[in-house]
């Protein structure tokens, strides 16, 4: 039980950090768009708005997944759970979490291979910035890893308490 609390605490702290980073990235997107608008008033441009905002949106989406899951903020369809007695909701959640964990672990593994390939080959974007693609790919990989960790922690909590985890206010 102590190990579960330790892993849960680590997962929460990492998710808070990634959630805060995702929120800061939203501010970055706003600032970059405003800068681009200002520059275009003078016939100038950063020439990388679409590219950098695209990378940022992918990054903040994946960094926010574990944070959102931990707080039960992801969209959830209750068609099956509404048909079951409440004492079995944890079991359904466990099955969904295990399937999600398996799928996202598989995706994370192949994304890791792709990121390593980009790093080894020195692959860059085709834009004027020639951004090394391993940088945004690594950020997505971190988000995927945090999601897998959060799903794993959720499964441990479900198995140990036999209850659906409740959201704790932060």
Image (cartoon, rainbow, N blue to C red):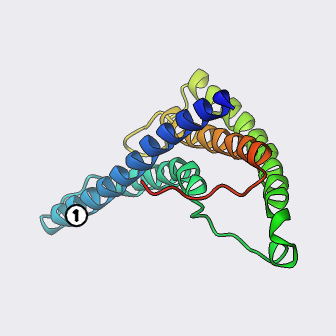
Q: Is there any visible trace of residue 48 in the rendered image?
A: no
Depth check, front residue: 140 or 104: 104
Q: Residues within 10 Å of mark 1 (few under 14, many from 20)?
A: few
Q: Residue furthest left?
A: 42
Depth check, front residue: 128 or 63: 63
Q: Secondary structure at mark 1?
A: helix
Q: Would residue 98 be found to the left or right of residue 40 on screen? A: right
x, y (%) of residue 167? 56, 58
Q: Would residue 121 be found to the left or right of residue 111 on screen? A: left
x, y (%) of residue 38? 16, 64
Residue at the spot 79% in from the left edge and 51% down from the top edge: 162
Residue at the spot 60% in from the left edge and 38% down from the top edge: 8
x, y (%) of residue 151? 69, 45
Residue beneath label 1, please?
Answer: 34
Q: Would residue 27 be found to the left or right of residue 52 on screen? A: left
Q: Relative to 92, is 17 above or below?
A: above
Q: Residue furthest top?
A: 120
Residue 110, located in which quarter of the rendered image?
top right
């Amino acid at each position: 039980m102590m190990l579960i609390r330790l892993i849960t605490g680590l997962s929460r702290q990492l998710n808070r950090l990634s959630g805060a980073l995702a929120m800061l990235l939203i501010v970055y997107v706003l600032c970059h768009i405003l800068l681009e608008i200002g520059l275009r008033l003078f016939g100038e441009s950063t020439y990388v708005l679409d590219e950098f905002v695209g990378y940022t949106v992918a990054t903040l989406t994946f960094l926010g997944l574990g944070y959102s899951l931990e707080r039960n903020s992801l969209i959830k369809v209750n068609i099956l759970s509404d048909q079951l007695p409440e004492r079995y909701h944890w079991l359904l959640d466990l099955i969904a979490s295990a399937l999600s964990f398996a799928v996202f672990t598989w995706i994370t593994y192949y994304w890791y291979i792709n990121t390593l390939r980009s790093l080894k080959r020195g692959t860059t974007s085709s834009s004027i910035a020639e951004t090394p693609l391993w940088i945004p790919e690594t950020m997505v990989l971190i988000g995927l890893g945090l999601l897998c960790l959060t799903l794993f922690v959720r499964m441990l909590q479900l198995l140990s308490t036999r209850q659906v985890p409740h959201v704790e206010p932060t």
